[in-house]
Image: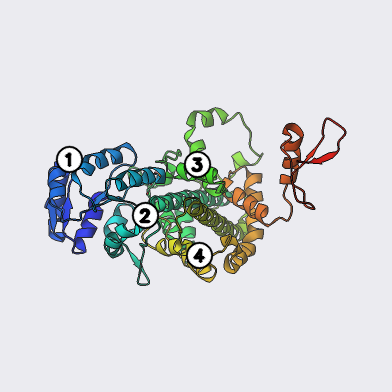
């Protein structure tokens, strides 16, 4: 990714010094792509730093965590006051805050910059989420806006906010990416077992969906993966030979850990992280197979790999309606996942005083990044109309869209439960929706229980103050 980002910068006419601790990699980059721009290869960190005009602008692209600290420790003593050091990796925003504060003491401007789009995006135009000071952005901004992809003439790069704001937003982006992928996987699983169709046949469904309100990079590549055969066996779908244990590098987990601290319910992201974790517990899963029974019909129906017409748990006559229902459930659940992600951005911004503009985040996610999608334009519009929108679900367009799909959404959740096919993303999104819209929640009972066993007190609907019942006494209520 670092190599492609360097090429992208050079292609835009910036003289680009390059350095890698493995010198052969630096040489290979210049040998292979040297004609794309002006590269200045450097063998050592000192040579690299010396080759830059002051104030220097340096982008680090290495593995998050220890490797990033190691590179910073190597470079920092060689830098001068006023230099700008950019971390373009997937760093934890708390690390970015720590590094920014430490380098500030030395007069070095440290900017944590989220870059999304994978290797190809880095070369052809990523979505960029830059954090750091206004001062650093004055120099960095024009370069980043140049190399980012543009949608409708607007670059997908904007100053997110100070210190860790950029990496925080990139982390939430990745959390939403996890939720989105989980929902797509659930839709695929339900269609596969509901209809008994082959992956290639389901690829057509996703291709059709990609021309409607679900249009997005992830739906597009789902169709690609599903229509791909195992390169080593003819006629066998690749998806059927890939081990069903999802891995993760950790940004989804960070999102959930941070959300717990902020008290923001990002249940869609959490379900996605936990579903990956469950998939990875292979031994437990194996032990449970054959021991824990599912609903009666499941073994006999719609086994993966079945041909069209082999049958699933949905009657053939209802197949088209089921596909429409799953599409509606996917869209509604996706809206919830994004609403939760944007809630978290607002909560983080408030906690750390970053002043993040949520509409601007939707704007820069419209292109270049993994979650790029048509409906981000709707999110941008929603925040443009109402910058202080308390939940995306309350925007008239999204409220209508979710309400239009809710009957189908409920049917799909019921069918998944009856068929014994886990759809935690769909179900928890629906539970969140219902939890949000209900006038009275069951939390009143929880408050009562807390007061009974721990004298934790409760508030009343009809009077101000904190109250407690003398549970082991005369049952009277006292005001704390
Ligand atoms: C991006 C991606 C990128 C990477 C994730 C994958 O925005 O370009 O999000 O950052 O693909 O790190 O994360 P997992 O390995 O945790 O699924």
Query: What residue sits right under mark 2 in the picture?
Result: 131
Q: Where, quadrant-wise, is the C terminus in this rendering?
A: top right
Nearest to the eye among marks 4 and 3: give it. 3
Query: What residue sits right under mark 3 in the picture?
Result: 257
Q: Residues within 10 Å of mark 1 (few under 14, many from 20)?
A: few
Query: What residue sits right under mark 1 in the picture?
Result: 22
Nearest to the eye among marks 3 and 1: give it. 3
Task: Evaluate if marks 4 and 2 touch, with contact meaning CB atoms under 8 Å apart.
Answer: no
The quadrant in which residue 125 appears is: bottom left
The residues tagged by marks 3 and 1 sit, at their Cα atoms, a distance apart of 35 Å
Q: Is mark 1 within 8 Å of ligand 1?
A: no
The residues tagged by marks 4 and 2 sit, at their Cα atoms, a distance apart of 22 Å
Q: Is residue 287 above or below residue 478?
A: above
Q: How many numbered marks are there? A: 4
Q: Is mark 4 within 8 Å of ligand 1?
A: no
The circle on residue 379 is 4
The residues tagged by marks 2 and 3 sit, at their Cα atoms, a distance apart of 21 Å
Q: Give how far across and how far down residue 457 sits, in percent.
A: 73, 40
State which tag comes first along the sequence, 2 or 1. 1
State which tag comes first along the sequence, 4 or 2. 2
State which tag comes first along the sequence, 2 or 3. 2
Query: Observer-nearest residue: 353 or 32?
Result: 353
State which tag comes first along the sequence, 3 or 1. 1
Query: Is 211 positioned to the left or the right of 327 in the image?
Result: left
């Amino acid at each position: 990714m670092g190599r492609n980002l360097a090429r992208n910068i050079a292609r835009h006419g910036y003289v680009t010094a390059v350095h890698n601790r493995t010198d052969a990699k630096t040489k290979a980059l210049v040998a292979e792509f040297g004609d794309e721009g002006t590269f200045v290869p450097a063998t050592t960190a000192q040579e690299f730093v010396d080759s830059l005009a002051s104030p220097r602008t340096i982008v680090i692209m290495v593995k998050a965590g220890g490797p990033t600290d190691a590179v910073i420790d190597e470079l920092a003593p060689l830098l001068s006051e006023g230099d700008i050091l950019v971390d373009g990796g997937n760093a934890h925003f708390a690390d970015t805050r720590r590094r920014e504060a430490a380098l500030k003491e030395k007069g070095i401007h440290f900017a944590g910059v989220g870059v999304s789009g994978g290797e190809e995006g880095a070369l052809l135009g990523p979505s960029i989420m830059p954090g750091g000071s206004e001062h650093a952005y004055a120099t960095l901004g024009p370069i980043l806006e140049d190399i980012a992809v543009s949608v409708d003439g607007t670059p997908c790069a904007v100053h997110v906010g100070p210190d860790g704001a950029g990496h925080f937003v990139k982390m939430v982006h990745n959390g939403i990416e996890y939720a989105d992928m989980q929902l797509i996987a659930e839709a695929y699983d339900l269609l596969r077992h509901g209809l008994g169709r082959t992956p290639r046949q389901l690829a057509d469904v996703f291709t059709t969906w990609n021309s409607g309100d679900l249009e997005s990079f992830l739906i597009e590549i789902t169709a690609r993966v599903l229509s791909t055969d195992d390169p080593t066996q003819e006629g066998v779908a690749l998806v059927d030979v890939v081990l069903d244990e999802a891995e993760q590098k950790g940004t989804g987990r960070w999102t959930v850990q941070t959300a717990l601290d902020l008290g923001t319910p990002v249940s869609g992201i959490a379900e996605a992280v936990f579903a990956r974790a469950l998939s990875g517990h292979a031994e437990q899963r194996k032990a449970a197979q054959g021991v824990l029974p599912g609903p009666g019909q499941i073994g006999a129906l719609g086994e993966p790999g079945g041909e069209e017409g082999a049958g699933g748990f949905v009657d053939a006559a209802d197949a088209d309606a089921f596909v429409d229902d799953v599409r509606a459930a996917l869209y509604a659940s996706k809206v919830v996942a994004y609403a939760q992600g944007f809630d978290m951005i607002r909560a983080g911004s408030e906690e750390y005083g970053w002043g993040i503009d949520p509409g601007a985040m939707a704007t820069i996610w419209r292109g270049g990044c993994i979650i790029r999608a048509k409906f981000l334009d709707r999110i941008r519009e929603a925040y443009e109309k109402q910058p202080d929108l308390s939940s995306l679900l309350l925007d008239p367009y999204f409220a209508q869209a979710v309400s239009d799909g809710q009957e189908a959404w409920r049917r799909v959740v019921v069918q998944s439960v009856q068929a014994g096919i886990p759809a935690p993303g769909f179900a928890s999104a629906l539970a969140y929706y219902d939890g949000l819209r209900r006038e009275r929640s069951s939390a009143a009972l929880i408050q009562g229980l807390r007061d009974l066993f721990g004298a934790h007190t409760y508030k009343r609907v009809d009077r101000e103050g904190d109250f407690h019942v003398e549970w082991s006494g005369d049952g009277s209520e006292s005001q704390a």
